[in-house]
Structures are given as structure tokens and as C-alpha cells.
Amino acid sequence: MTGRTVPLSVRVSHDDADFLASLEIEGAESPSEKLRALITEARRRQDSVGGFSEAQLELRRLIQPLIEKVQDFEANNEEYSQLLHLGLEWIPEAMAELVAQRFKLTGEAESEQMQQLERRVTDRVFRLIEGFLRLAVTQDCEGYDPQVVQKRLPKIRQLIELMRIMEQNTPT
């Protein structure tokens, strides 16, 4: 491919034009520069996300503005939410696992591949559950609402009790 550019003409709705005008992209001021930056970003995303690490970096990059808002709020209000940070850490990691598996499962998926996917997803889900339950060990978890975990524990306790009853009634 040469370094020559190809002129394009596109029609967009007024809403899309307003959105493009208000979109802030570093180093891109005009609509043409912004469209080129969006194409470059889409190409980078498509070309780079193939494995777990790349997918996780991309997903973390996508939520970075939210993470920064959380950090600013916590710094300004001298508050911290272990629960929120756990979620912000876990969600991109879990999604990266799914994205990475998407590239591993090519053609007709075999039973062993699907079992491995199931194990990997289950492991990630249970790590999150264990993290939440660790927060439930204390009366007040470290969060904006110290009772946020305690409020949900009665349902968890009911489920655990039902599991115990089922286990006792199941012949071994």
C-alpha cells in the first residue's frame, strides 16, 4: 500500500455530525482527522486483540476513563470501595478470557475445547465470588456503602443452606 490518500465522501445524520464535532481525540481537530483516527483505532483493535494479554489491555484501555473518575472521586472524598475495585479488576479480565477464547475456537469446536472454556470461565466466576465473600467476612466492607455486601448476604446464606440440605439428602 502506498502512502497516497483516497478522498472519500460520506453522508451522516446531523446527530452523527454533532457527535463527531464534539468528539475529543488527541491530535485530531477536523472531521477528516477524527475519521482517520477512528479508522486507525478500529484497525489497531482488530489487529492487536488475539490473545488474553492483548484483549485485557484493550478492555482496560476502554474503561480507563471510568477508573480515573472512580480514583478522582475517592481522592476528593477520601473514600474507597474495595468492591468496586474488585469489579473493575475482574470484569476486563473475565472479558479478556472470552475474547481470547474466541480466537482459539476456530472451525468446529471439539468437546475438549468447550470443556476447557467452561473450566476457564467457571474459574474466573468463582474467583469473583470468593472475592465478594471475603468482603462479607467483616461486618462493614470497605466501600462507599459499608453495608452493600451485608444487604445481599441473606440470599447467599439461603442458597448455601439449600446446598447443605441437598448434599445431606443425596446418597453417596
Image (cartoon, rainbow, N blue to C red):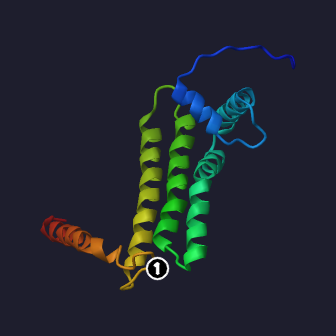
Residue at 50% from the left image edge and 55% from the top image edge: 91
Q: Position of residue 33 (x, y in %)?
A: 75, 30
Disc 1 residue type?
Glu
Reply above or below: 78 against 4: below
Quarter of the image for the N terminus: give it: top right
Position of 19 with respect to 157 (left or right) is: right
Residue 167 appears in which quarter of the rendering? Answer: bottom left
Quarter of the image for the C terminus: give it: bottom left
Residue at 35% from the left image edge and 78% from the top image edge: 147
Q: Position of residue 80 (x, y in %)?
A: 52, 76
67 vs 118, nearest the viewer = 67
Reply above or below: 128 against 82: above
Q: Position of residue 28 (x, y in %)?
A: 75, 37
Q: Secondary structure at mark 1?
A: loop
Q: Residue furthest right?
A: 3
Q: Residue furthest left?
A: 169
Residue ID for mark 1: 142
25 vs 91, nearest the viewer = 25
Residue at 36% from the left image edge and 85% from the top image edge: 139
Residue 168 appears in which quarter of the rendering? Answer: bottom left
143 vs 19, nearest the viewer = 19
Residue 159 appears in which quarter of the rendering? Answer: bottom left
Circle 1 Cα neighbour tier, 10 Å, few/some/many (<14 / 14–19 / ≥20): some
Reply above or below: 57 against 147: above
Q: Position of residue 3 (x, y in %)?
A: 87, 20
